[in-house]
Image (cartoon, rainbow, N blue to C red):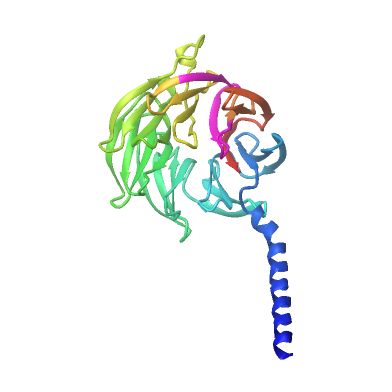
């Protein structure tokens, strides 16, 4: 009889534990993979939130002065946003829908990247001409390196030992050794280099905004192996200004925003050949893909909207107003 009572008590305890877990589940789900698309608006000083399933703006949040580049933290629970006119990176808590913290990373941060271990954030400080390193655990800036004028693109190597930075004015890619905190090589690329893309083929691609091209850098020796030129039909070369890039989930296709050419280029990564051009909005700039690779999101800085592109049909199927001068887009699906 005693054993039976104990068994009933265990069952009651188990039911109570299950009930607590069930109640907690919605909160855990809300913490990431929310099905939201985030767009930073430079002129509205705001973060626009788009429902990925409906393709509609569901919220706009006054965030900071001139929000630009954005990136999810490794656990996908927070969104980091570079606020150029505040000298900070704002930490936006996705589940709680509020600013969790403000990180003083240095003057006029534009782009940044996070080390593979999630400990360090590296930001380009446009007006100071520096790369700053910020310790995300100690919550302090640890060092900075002087680079060429108007640095923008930042990319950390897969092993975390090197950081690549573009200098728009110098037309260089700086290679910075993290251990020594020094530039170990300067790579000459096309005119006004902007953003990076690491491919699975051991290559680092950099867009040359005023060169209408991509420079392909071999990672093993940091030599330029070739150039990918963009020539959309009917467009003048000076209107082809590539900036943002994103890689498909299988690593076989790269999508490149061609800026004032109002198109996105579809590039085969292995052959480096342009397969197609997709019409977008005015000044196609920042790009992001859904996790399944079926929807490409493109911020259009001069038409103040977001294009939603079906990658199978290679055609835009919807346009969403997303504030004045949308800069970057991040998908949390």
Q: Could you tell me which quadrant the C terminus lies in?
A: top right
Work out whether residue 91 or residue 96 is closer to the camera in this orientation and state it: 96
Q: Answer left or right for 261 relative to 51.
A: left
Q: Position of residue 230 (x, y in %)?
A: 44, 18
Q: Position of residue 325 (x, y in %)?
A: 61, 30
> What residue is at 46 percent from the left and 47 percent from the top?
106
Specify the quadrant of the image occupied by residue 270. top left
> What residue is at 58 percent from the left and 29 percent from the top?
298
> What residue is at 51 percent from the left and 9 percent from the top?
234
| 314 falls in the magenta region | no
Q: Is residue 92 above or below residue 314?
A: below
Work out whether residue 4 or residue 60 is closer to the camera in this orientation and state it: 4
Q: Is residue 210 visible?
A: yes
Work out whether residue 43 or residue 118 is closer to the camera in this orientation and state it: 118
Q: Is residue 67 visible?
A: no
Q: Which residues are magenta?
A: 275-297
Which residue ends up furthest to the top in the rendered image? 234
- Total marks shown come to 0
Q: Answer left or right for 38 relative to 148.
A: right
| 286 falls in the magenta region | yes
Q: Position of residue 74 (x, y in %)?
A: 50, 51
Q: Is residue 285 above or below residue 31?
A: above
Q: Is residue 245 above or below residue 92?
A: above
Q: Position of residue 151 (x, y in %)?
A: 41, 36
Work out whether residue 69 or residue 252 is closer to the camera in this orientation and state it: 252
């Amino acid at each position: 009889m005693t054993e039976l009572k104990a068994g009933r008590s265990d069952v009651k305890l188990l039911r109570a534990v299950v009930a607590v877990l069930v109640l907690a589940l919605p909160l855990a789900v809300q913490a990431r993979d929310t099905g939201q698309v985030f767009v930073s608006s430079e002129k509205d000083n705001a973060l626009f939130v788009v429902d990925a399933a409906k393709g509609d703006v569901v919220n706009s949040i006054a965030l900071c002065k001139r929000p630009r580049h954005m990136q999810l933290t490794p656990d996908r629970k927070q969104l980091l946003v570079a606020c150029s006119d505040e000298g900070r990176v704002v930490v936006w808590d996705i589940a709680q829908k509020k600013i969790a913290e403000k990180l003083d990373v240095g003057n006029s941060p534009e782009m940044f990247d996070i080390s593979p271990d999630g400990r360090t954030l590296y930001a380009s400080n446009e007006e100071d001409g520096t790369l700053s390193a910020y310790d995300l655990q100690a919550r302090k800036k640890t060092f900075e390196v002087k680079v060429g004028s108007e640095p923008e693109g930042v990319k950390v190597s897969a092993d975390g030992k090197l950081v690549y930075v573009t200098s728009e004015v110098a037309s260089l890619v700086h290679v910075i050794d993290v251990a020594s905190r020094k530039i170990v090589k300067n790579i000459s690329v096309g005119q006004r280099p902007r953003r990076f893309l690491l491919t699975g083929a051991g290559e680092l691609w950099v867009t040359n905004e005023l060169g209408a091209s991509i420079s392909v850098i071999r990672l093993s020796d940091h030599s330029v192996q070739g150039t990918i030129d963009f020539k959309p039909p009917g467009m003048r070369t000076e209107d082809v200004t590539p900036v943002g890039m994103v890689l498909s989930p299988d690593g076989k296709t790269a999508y490149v925003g061609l800026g004032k050419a109002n198109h996105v280029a579809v590039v085969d990564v292995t052959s480096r050949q342009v397969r197609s051009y997709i019409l977008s909005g005015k000044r196609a700039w920042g790009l992001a893909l859904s996790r399944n690779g079926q929807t490409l999101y493109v911020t259009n800085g001069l038409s103040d909207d977001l294009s939603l592109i079906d990658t199978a049909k290679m055609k835009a199927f919807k346009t969403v107003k997303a504030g004045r001068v949308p800069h970057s887009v991040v998908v949390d699906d």
